[in-house]
Structures are given as C-alpha cells and as structure tokens.
Amino acid sequence: MPPRPALFEFGTRNFVCKSCLSALRKRSTTTISWPIRQSSQAAHAPAPGRANRRSPEQEAERLKTLRALGLLKDAPEKPSVHYFEQGENGRIRPIQDEGEFSRALTDPGGELDARLKELEDHLQGVTEMAKVIEKLGGKEEADKLRRQFSQESGDNADDLLEDTDDRSISSLAIPTDGLNENRRDRIHRLNNWIRRCSRARENNDVLPKEIQRLWKAYSAARTTLSGRWHTVPAPTWEVLWQVLSAEYAFNTNRMSHIYALTKDIQQSGIPLRPEQQILALEAMFVDGWENEAIENHRRHVSTLGAHPETFLPFWQLGLQMYCRLGDLERAERVATTILKSPYETDPRFVQPLIKLCAETPTAVETGFKLYRDLRASLGDSMTIEDYDRIISFFLASGNTEYALFIFVDMMKSGSIDLVETRQYPPSIANHFFFGKWLKRLIGAGDLEGALNVIHFMSSRGIKPHAIQVNGLIGAWLRSGVADSVQKAEDIAWEMIKVRIQFVELRRKKLSSHGVDLYAHGDGWPRANLETFSLLAENYKERGLPAKMGPLWQSLQEARITPDSFMINQLLFSVLQDGDNETVLPIYQEMFQRFNLKPDSHTFMALWQALPANRFVRISPEKWNTETSRTRALFAEMIKQASIFKSKDGMSIDSSLARNILHSFRKIRDHAGLLLAYRALRRIANYNPPDMIVFEMLLGTLDLERLAHRREASKLIAARATLDHYLAHRHRELKASREIEEGDDMPPEMRAEETGNFLELHLEAAFSGKAEEAGEDAQRLAIEAAEEMGLRAQGAQDAESRPDP
C-alpha cells in the first residue's frame, strides 16, 4: 500500500521569473580576488601547490633543514594598534583596549549602557515589589504590575519579568544550541514574545500590539527555524496557534498567519488536529490558493467529511468555498448533503447559497425560495440582521422587487405577502413606507442599494420625497469618492431642473387660463433649499467657487429664499475666489433683503475677509483706515451679540475669538485689542486657552514655526512667565482660603486666572504705547469704545439690569 500523502499539499508556483533567470545566467563561478597586503613571511612561504604534493614527513624534514641553515625567518611580531577617541569638545583621548573601542563604536556616549542600567534598576524594583505583593496573596495584582512594566518598557526588556522557574513557561522555550549570536537573539526574542502572549492568553488579555510583535518575531526567526523545526516544542506550537488563530477583531491578518503556521507545523512533523485541518483549509482558500483548497477538500471527504465532530464545519466550509467560486451545482449538492445529515445545524448556513442564487439570473427564484424556507425554519428567532443581510444580496444583484418582498416580510411580520399581488396595497405603495427602507439603507451605508430602491419607486409610479433623495445625495458627497460625488451632483442638478420647470409651469398656468400643463422628467422630486445647501457646502469644501455662480443663479430661478447657511457658503466661496472686498457688501445686501440673522460662521467669513487676514502687507499710512474698518466690523458683531447665546449661557467659538484678537494685533491697534478682549470676556464669557495666550504674547500665529526658527527660548520664557503668575496667584488664593491647603487650582479657576494674565499684559502694552506716543490712554480707550459699539452695549446692559 503506498504511503498516505501529506495532509495538505500546499501549492507552489513552478516558474522562475525573468529577472531571476537573468541573474542566474550572469552569475560567475569564479570568486573575486580582493587585493590584500601580505606580510614578509608570506613571501617566503612555499607555494600551496608544492606543499600539497609533499607528504607530512617530507614537509617537516624540509622545514627542519631550512631552520638549521638559517634560511627560515621567524614570523614577525604582531603590530600593536593604539585607539583614540575625539569628544564633542574636540579633545582626543586614548582608548585602553579593543573592548573599549568596540563599546565606543556601538554605544557612543554611553547612552545605551545608561538606558540599560536604568531598565535594570527599574526592573529590580518592580520585580521585588511584585514578589512582595504575590507573597501577600495578590497574584493577580503582581501579574498586572509585571504586565504594566512590560508595556511601558517595550520589547527590549518585556519578558525579563517572566517567571522562568515556572515549568509551564520554561517548557515553551525554543533551544538555541549551536546558533550564532545573531540567530540566537532572534530565537530569544521569539521566546520572550511567546511567553508574554501565553501569559496574556491565560488572562484573556491579549492586545493588538502583542499579536503584531509576536508575528514579527516569528517571521524574523522562520529562516533560522527552517532547518530545525524539530527543536520547537509541541506546547510552543500550541501557543502560537492559539494566539495567532484567535478571532480577535484586530487580528486582520489571521488567515495569512494560519496559512504560514500550518505549513511550518507540518514541516516539524506534528500532526494537526481535525479542527486545525479545517481552519487550515479555509486559510489556504482565503490566502489565494482556491484550486488547491478545493482539491484538498475533496481528498478529505472520507475522513473529515465523515467524522461526526467535523462533519458540519467541513461541509459548511465547502459550501462557502463553492459559493465564492460561483459553482452553483456543487454548492447545491453540498447544501443537500448538510440538510440530509442527521446532525442538527443552524439553518443560516444557507445564506451564502442564497447570495449565489441572487447573483445568478436563472436561479433568483430558487434563492427566494431558500429564503422562505430559512424564514420558516427560524420562525421568531430570525433577527433584523438576518433580514438586512439577505435583502442586501438581492439589492446588490439588481433584484429590487424580491428585496422589497423580504423587507415587507420584516416590517409586516408576514401579514402581507406581495408575491402573488399584481398591485401593491396603499400601505406599501407610498413614499413614507419606502422612506423607512431608504433611511435604513443609507444608515447602513448601502448607497447603491438605496439608489436601486429609488429607481424601483419611480418605475412603480411612487415619487420619492426630496428629503429622502437629499439623504442619499448627502451620503454620497460625504464619502469623498469621485464617482459617488459625481452621481450626487447629477441627481441634485436633475432635481434643480425639475424645480425650475415647476416654477415656469406655475407661472404659465397663472397667465394661461383654462390650459392644463404637466411637467415631464425622470421622476426625480423637486429640489428644495436643502438640496442647494448640500451642493453649496460641497463646492465650498472642495474649493470650487466657479460652480457657486450657476448654483446661486439657479436658486433665484427656483424662487427659493436662502437661509443664513446658504449665504455663508456663498461668502466663503467668494473668499476662496480671492474677492474679499465684496464679502461685506454681499453680507449687507443679502441679510437685509431676506431679513436674516447672521451666525458665528457669517462673522468668521467677515473677519477672514479683512486685509489683515488675507496675507496682504498693510503700509503704515493705511493703518488708520484698517483700524476704523476693523472696529466697525466689531461694532456690527456686538449689535448681533445675541447669536452667542446657548443653553449654557453666552459663549463664542474659540476660532472666531482667535481670529478677532489677531485681527487687531496685526494692525497694531492696542486700544482696540484690549477692548475687544475685555468685551469677549464680559459678554461671551471667553477665556483663551494657553496656546492663544502664547500667540498673543509672542505676536505670532504659528508657534511651531517659531520653535523651528530657533526661537524656542521665547516660548519657554513665555511659559515660565505664565507659570510664575499662576503660582503666585495660587499662593494668594491659599492665603485667602479660597483654595484649601494642598489642593491644586481648579480648571475653571485656572482658565479665569490665565485670562486675567493676558488682560494685564494687554493693558501694560496699551499703556506703554500710549505713553511713548504722548497720548492720553483714557481718551484713546473712550474713542475706541465709541467706534466699536461698546459704549452703546454698556448703556444697553445698564438699562437691562433691575434696580437694586
């Protein structure tokens, strides 16, 4: 009887690529002779060919005669080499021996030795602490401490903490006998990660980083182990299998790991368990060896396919593989084998077959019948996820009507059957019912399925609502995929055309009495303001201001009143087009014409439109003009201060506040900057974060660039100044008993004190500049307050306060 073939015959690609063949042809059999300086003794040494022709006795006699005659010179003494090292200061110092010279090359400055010493000290302290905790009965806490140190120290010292006296741990070690230092290090690193992952698996606490590092260490050691698979202990293979084949959500390369691991285990001569064999078959198929996996599956029909413990997993795997390959005939035979078996199974195993039938035009009805059989078998245990999965099979293959039948079964619990119905009942044939389906599909990300449903509605005379189509358009635009964005634009513009056509028909009906006019088109609903807003926002985000003109013109032709959001997109598009001078006139005209109320985004566009924020160099003679312009914009914002109201009181967007402060700083309006900052704090309860404080102190918008320009000392000094102020205030607050002894400053109080620090700095800068110019600081502040609308706001606040 011939020997049984290997359990799995892994496929090999029997070809050699052209580049390798070319390299093999060019490879020379002669070795390159490198020029080497020979010693004087080598010149007198006998030729190798002659010495080899003499016997050992003859050669010894010859050398003895030459030595007696004084013709054989003694070998010269080995030359001595002195090593030196030049430090960073330029001084040269001698190095004692070759050992110190090697250490100087591998670890200049002794940084590695210092790091290792630090790790050793830390390790010793953690180890001693863990032993004490374990003696007190807290083994779990000790293990937790060990693992915490392992994660902090990385893979350089992680498994030095493992208890190698434990037999269960030491038995996993792969021996390193007979290996050089490099290969021994690879095996040692693999042993460390095997022990670490074994401990983590026992505690059910395996992390993504551990699986990645284990596979990395195993891959690095595979070449070394390829000639000595027999040295790997069986428990080690078991740990590798349990960890690398575990179904963790983060183990995305699970099948490729199993495929490689299975081949290595076979090379070691250790037989695979039946469940491992089935998993190896699946890994072979998923890794791209479909034909080999199918062949191995057929070869083991009489073994794995007949054993009670492996019958169902084996045949269900075969069903999945045949369905993936599109072999409907064999898939049906396998399904029949499972159904006729005496073993109980989950009826859901037929779902891959339903998917294959839905994708095969001649077997769609068979797939729907399989669904009905599955629904009858599951009964009330059939979940919404089951329905959604099967619906997606039919939607993806273009069988929308069958998908509708299944959706109606899900929504109506089988009380309505549309299969034999020629006309849908009113409870189904309306855009509200289909809207529920569309909402579910769009929420699940099945946008193509949602589009198929919309087309199906139009074919049945059911016009979708604009809100439903807008949901699909918005999802397509948010995806960022070019094809999806183009589909969204095309459908949105079709809806806009329908809207404009409706407006024209309405106008003609009013002027033509007794004449009935009807719209024509592809069944898309009329666009509404949301449709225009979706396109406007997308054009703004993509930087396409040229498309905003036709869109705005279409909005006017559609007779739709814009809102503040739509006008904001228009303002930002004008900014992107570089026409910042027209932003303010457009704002004034639009908001006045449509009686709209601006919001924070509106004022963000207006502040960004100022020349100070448009990378324009402002000459000193224009500072007064820009100062008046900036103050006037601030006054306009103060008149609309109610926009800063929220559920938690008054608040302002941090980006807008930052833009306002830097606008005054750039034009060197110290009075306006101080008053604007005070107004933001009093009116909008604004306290800047540390980053904005440092920007104002250093006069820059880019702190990172400042650090790269070797001016980080300024940032460090600013941080030290702020810390010194906060520490001083902390002592004062403790002295006044506002903070208890030993307590830190609460975050809200710290933010308030940081805001006070910046205000003091701005006051000092304003007073200093006024004194340098010989101006009255009080008068300058009053004038600035008048221009910025702050005196009127103060009077209004005073009138709104109740009398005491």
Image (spheres, grey):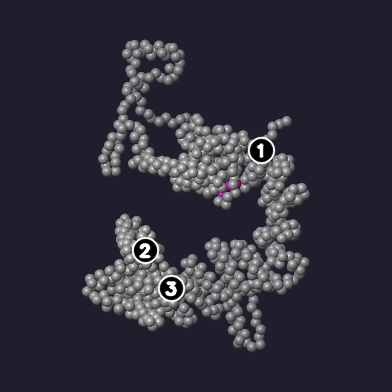
Q: Position of residue 202 (x, y in %)?
A: 56, 44
Q: Position of residue 708 (x, y in %)?
A: 34, 56
**Mark 2 Cα shell of 10 Å, populated few (<14), some (14-19), many (≥20):** some
Q: Mark 2–mark 3 contact, CB under 8 Å?
A: no
Q: Closer to the camera: disc 1 or disc 3? A: 3
**Extreme residue in the bottom direction:** 513
Q: Earlier in the sequence, mark 1 or mark 3?
A: 1
Point 30% across, 67% down: residue: 761
Tag on residue 739?
Answer: 2
Residue 630 vertical placement versus 198 (above, below): below
Q: Is residue 353 visible?
A: no
For disc 3, the marked residue is 650
**Mark 1 Cα shell of 10 Å, populated few (<14), some (14-19), many (≥20):** few
Give the distance between the C-alpha atoms of the residues marked 1 and 3, in whole angstroms. 73 Å
Segment colored magenta: 251-255
Residue 526 vertical placement versus 223 (above, below): below
Q: Earlier in the sequence, mark 2 or mark 3?
A: 3
Q: Amino acid at mark 3?
A: Met
For disc 1, the marked residue is 7
Q: Position of residue 200 (x, y in %)?
A: 54, 45
Residue 252 falls inside the magenta stretch:
yes
Point 49% across, 72% down: residue: 548
Residue 69 versus residue 680: which sits nearer the camera? Answer: 680
Q: Closer to the camera: disc 1 or disc 2? A: 2
Q: Secondary structure at mark 1?
A: loop
